Image: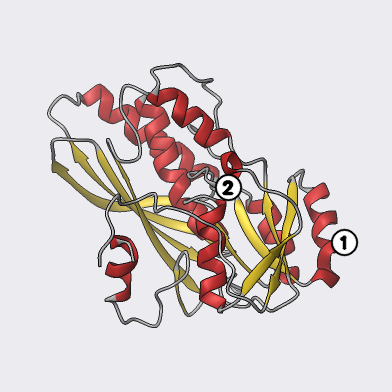
Amino acid sequence: MDSEHFLINQLTSKYIGDDGAVIGNMVYSVDAFYENIHFKREWMTLEQIAKKAMLVNISDAIAMNAIPQYALVSIAIPKDISREDILKLTDGLEETADNFGCEIIGGDTVGGDKLDISITIISKSDNPLYRKGLKSGDLLAFTGNLGESKRDLDRLFNGEKIDENSRFFTPTLRDKFIYKSRNFLSSGMDISDGLYCDTNKLLEYNNLGFNTLIDINDNIGESGEEYEMLIGFDKNNLNDVLKISEDTMTPITVFAEVADNKRRFNCKSHHFNSEII
């Protein structure tokens, strides 16, 4: 068990386990976006950093079929950040939040050695999409075209430049697709740790396995930070899901069928290098 799962398993709240905690018709989620963990400042402009920090947080709300309402933002500000830099950060955060109808209503600032951003999103849903709900025979699919994020991250580590429109910088969120298809879906989550690892999480949560329908190569399966959607649905709903994907211009790939087995993909944690024994 890696450190992330060990820590989560120490907490006992019944609300833990999804991309957000559902209490009534409100959904609460939080994600951190830390320098030298999720990004390097030499790779990204401050505007790109602020935009991605907000997008990866709003992604959790969308994954729950929730509409973002409010955001709380905490930022650790290094000494080399100027007032002009702070304006770039706040403008990027507010502009991105505004695009999804979300208002920043507060937060906290502290001094720090690195630029670290943590955001809490408060959203609303009358029909949340949970990870629980898969059944044997359901189809598993992912949205978008996976692999670009890992490819471009590898290029950055090699000292290469990547396109300013790269999905590593600006993930594409699938809000229109999820909001329209919710009634046809059994379960879902966003893909932050890679298709392999996140499929395993979804299956473990439902105590099920899978049989592959197509071959997935490692460049696709191991690409984290994608923020596309992993969804499961009854095969009788396939035509409806495909119609909505077409209507919303959302590519979708059906890659597996849920089965009564214990099969898992081989994957490594994206968060920690060490295992807790």
Describe the element under mark 1 as helix, strand or loop: helix
When the figure is inspected, residue 30 is found, relative to residue 34, above or below; the finding is: below
Kindly report which numbered mark, 1 or 2, lies closer to the viewer in this rendering.
Answer: 2
Whether residue 99 can be seen here: yes
Of marks 1 and 2, which one's residue comes earlier in the chain? 2
Whether residue 44 can be seen here: no
In percent of width and height, residue 219 lies at 57, 39
Describe the element under mark 2 as helix, strand or loop: helix
Residue drawn 76% across the image and 47% down it: 248
Cα distance in 3D space between marks 1 and 2: 25 Å
In percent of width and height, residue 16 lies at 39, 74
* Dot 1 amino acid type: Asn
Residue 117 placement, left or right of 60: left
In percent of width and height, residue 84 lies at 26, 22
* Residue that numbered label 1 is attached to: 239
Q: In the image shown, does 76 or 144 lie closer to the viewer?
A: 144
Residue 233 placement, left or right of 1: right
Residue drawn 73% across the image and 72% down it: 138
Res 78 quadrant in image: top left
* Residue that numbered label 2 is attached to: 221
In percent of width and height, residue 5 lies at 34, 66
When the figure is inspected, residue 94 is found, relative to residue 154, above or below; the finding is: below
* Color theme of the render: secondary structure
Q: In the image shown, does 105 or 210 lie closer to the viewer?
A: 210
